[in-house]
Amino acid sequence: MAERDEASAAPEPATEDAPRRSGWRRQYSPEEIEAAKQQWRDMRPWDSPMARADKVLIGCMVGAFVLAMATLPLRPFLLASHPTVLAAVTGSSSAIGAGAAFARIGQADLWLVIVAGIVGKAKFDWLYWWAGRRWGAKGVKFFVPTDRAQRFVERVRSWPMWAMFLLVIAAALPGVPALLVYLLAGLAGSSFVAFLAASIIGAGVMTGLVAGLGYALGQSAVDVVLVVDRYALWISLAVAVVIAVQAGRSQGRRQRRAAATRS
């Protein structure tokens, strides 16, 4: 009787279909690992092994992302003290407007604010033109994996270059998917010089509009900037909290999708 109770209490042997676990971490089967690797190979736009140009391009994109994230908590502090520097580093419209407002009261040079804004807005656009030029439709799918974007890829191949030039200029305006436009410009075969010229013109138009508004507001805009500067620490902390919450939610969604896929 005791032997029968011990046998019934003994754990059932793991089957092939049951997920294997080690402590709190799930052990994936070789088939699952290979399937994940194949999915990654199908998704990535570059060939294997990566060429030097692919590594440089990815490295530059990662560097641009790190720069944007690193400056995010510092923006409220720099907005009042160094708006022109902030405009050159981030291309922020608020920094351009603040710099122009300071120029109105004689504390900055308007032309320098405009140049800094153009540089800040256009400095990394060429990376996505290069990605579209080098990786083609796979590059567009990697960055914009939507069916709508893929349908647009087929249309843009037949567009004349002057239409693409105008579209790149318009990409600087709010609401236009600039990333997709720059990728498509490279995909369509737009030359680097033409793309850079269109990107600078678009950035100049947008910078001019924002700087004109800031210059017209003058002291009123400066007063708002000084209020932001007074509460810069709390604003930075709020930004950090929002980023952390968003990251946690994204991680939770990924875990739920992974659990649903396994089940």
Image (cartoon, rainbow, N blue to C red):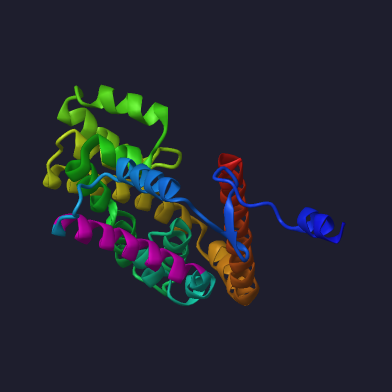
User: Does residue 62 belong to the magenta stretch?
Assistant: yes
| Above or below for 203 versus 81 | above
In percent of width and height, residue 17 lies at: 57, 42
Q: Nearer the viewer, residue 57 or 128?
A: 57
| Residue visible at 62% across and 66% down in the picture | 23
Residue 176 is left or right of residue 258, and the answer is left
- Whether residue 140 is visible here, answered yes or no, is yes
User: Does residue 161 belong to the magenta stretch?
Assistant: no
In percent of width and height, residue 140 lies at: 31, 38
The chief SS type of the magenta part is helix
Q: Nearer the viewer, residue 238 or 162?
A: 238
Residue 179 is left or right of residue 47, and the answer is right
Residue 253 is left or right of residue 100, and the answer is right
First to last magenta residue range: 53-72
In percent of width and height, residue 94 lies at: 48, 59
The quadrant of the image that shows the C terminus is top right
| Residue visible at 44% across and 71% down in the picture | 70
| Residue visible at 76% across and 56% down in the picture | 7
Q: Nearer the viewer, residue 54 or 242?
A: 54
The quadrant of the image that shows the N terminus is bottom right
- Whether residue 110 is visible here, answered yes or no, is no
In percent of width and height, residue 127 lies at: 25, 53
| Residue visible at 46% across and 52% down in the picture | 213
Q: How many numbered dots are placed on residues in this image?
A: 0
Q: Residue furthest right?
A: 1
Q: Nearer the viewer, residue 8 or 90?
A: 8
